[in-house]
Image (cartoon, rainbow, N blue to C red):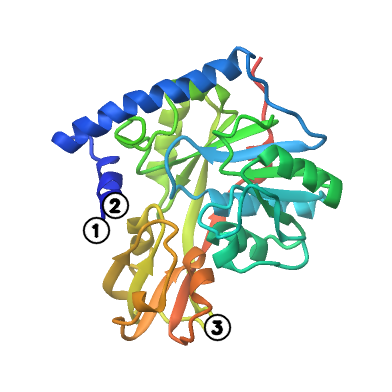
Amino acid sequence: MNIKTNITKLHYDRNASGILVKVLEGMSSIYGIGSGLKNILYDKGLLKARKVDAQVISVGNMTTGGVGKTPVVLEIVRHLIKKGKKVCVISRGYGGKLSNKKVNVISDGRHVLYTATMAGDEPFWLAQKAQGACVLTCKDRYKAAKYAIEKFGTEIIILDDGFQHRKLHRDIDIVLMDSKMGLGNEKLLPAGPLREGAEALDRIDKLLIVSKDIEHSKAQKFAKIMEKRLNIETILCAIEPDYIYNIKTGERLEEGATVTAICAIGQPQQFFNFLDAYNVKQGIALDDHHQYSPTDLVDISGDIVTTEKDAVKLLRFDKDNIYALKLRTLLDVERLLNVKKKS
C-alpha cells in the first residue's frame, strides 16, 4: 500500500492524528487559499466563464473520485438521446495516454476510435456504452465544446467531472455525494477529500445522493438531511449489482462461485460489498486509474471479477477467466434535469 492509498484512508477518518495529518492540514491551508481565490474571482465576475451555443450540463462532485459520476453521466446521455438530442460527453481524459492539450475524438457517436489505454478508462467506457453520443477528451473544455458543436452539431454537452472547471459556462450543475462517505472528514485536499470549500455550495443546482447498497432507506434519510442542511434540492440515485459476466464470451457467472476480486477505483470496498453473493477468496485494491500489466494477474488462480471500468483495460490480456460486475442505475433523470435556477 503506497502513501496515496494511506492518505485516501485518512480522508474518511475523522479521528486521524499524527505528524502526517498536521503536515497535510498545513498543505490544505495553502490549497484552500488558491481554490478560494479562484472562486472569488469568478463569483465577483473578475473572471468570466465562456458560453457556447449549446446547453451545458456538468456532472461532478466536491470530493475526490469514486462517487459514481460515470454511470450517472451514461443515464443522462441515454435519456437525452431517446429524446432525439445530439449529445456530446466531454472529459479531461485523466489516466489516458493521449495528450489532453488537444481535442481527442474518442467516439464519433458510431465508432470507438481509441483503446482504453490511450483514451482513459472512463471516456472509453462511455464511448462503448453511450451509442449515439460523441465522446471527447481535452483539458480545455471550452475548446472541446466548440469542436463538438462545429463538427457534430451538438445540442447538449455533458461535462464528466466538470464542477471545478469554471472556464466553461454551464446551465446545470449537478453534484454527486456518496451516501456513506458524505464529505469525509470535511477537510480540503490533501488533508481531506474536498476539492473546494463551502463557497462552492452556492453553485450547486441539484445534489444527487448516490446509494451503493441493496437497501436504500438509510440513503434516502441521508438525502433528506443533506437537503435540509445545505438548502439544495436533493434526490437519490441507487446503484445496485445486476449480474457478473465473462468479458470475452458474455457468459454469466452463477452466484456462489469462488472468485478473486480486483479493482482500481476510488472506493474499492463498495465494489467488494457488491459481491456478497459470491465466495470472494481475496480482494485486491489497486490505485484509482491504475494501468494494468500482466504481472498484476500472474499470481491469481481461478476466476477473476472486476468492475466494468477496469474490464476495459483487461480485455487486451489473453485470459478467459476475467469477469465484470454489471451495475444497474436507478435514477429519475427527468427530475434530475428539471432545475429551477436560483435567483
Q: Quadrant of the N terminus?
A: bottom left
Please name the amino acid that badge 1 sits on: Met
Q: Which callout, 2 or 3, points to the residue nearer the camera? A: 2
In three-dimensional space, the C-alpha distance between marks 1 and 3, rounded to whole angstroms, equals: 30 Å
Q: Mark 2–mark 3 contact, CB under 8 Å?
A: no
- Residue closer to the observer: 57 or 179: 57
The mark that comes first in sequence, 1 or 3, is: 1
User: Residue 161, image x and y in percent?
Assistant: 56, 43
User: Residue 13, image x and y in percent?
Assistant: 23, 40
Q: Is residue 262 above or below residue 255?
A: above
Residue wearing tag 2: 5
User: Residue 314, image x and y in percent?
Assistant: 48, 74
The secondary structure type at the circle numbered 3 is: loop
Residue wearing tag 1: 1
Q: Is residue 104 above or below residue 22?
A: below
Residue placed furthest toward the left: 18
Please name the amino acid that badge 2 sits on: Thr
Q: Mark 1–mark 2 contact, CB under 8 Å?
A: yes
- Residue drawn 68% across and 32% down? 168
Relative to 107, is 230 on the left or the right? Answer: left
Q: Is residue 211 above or below residue 250?
A: above
Mark 3 burial class by Cα count in 10 Å: few <14, some 14-19, many 20+: some
Residue wearing tag 3: 248
In three-dimensional space, the C-alpha distance between marks 1 and 2, rounded to whole angstroms, equals: 6 Å
Q: Quadrant of the C terminus?
A: top right
Relative to 293, is 157 on the left or the right? Answer: right
Please name the amino acid that badge 3 sits on: Lys
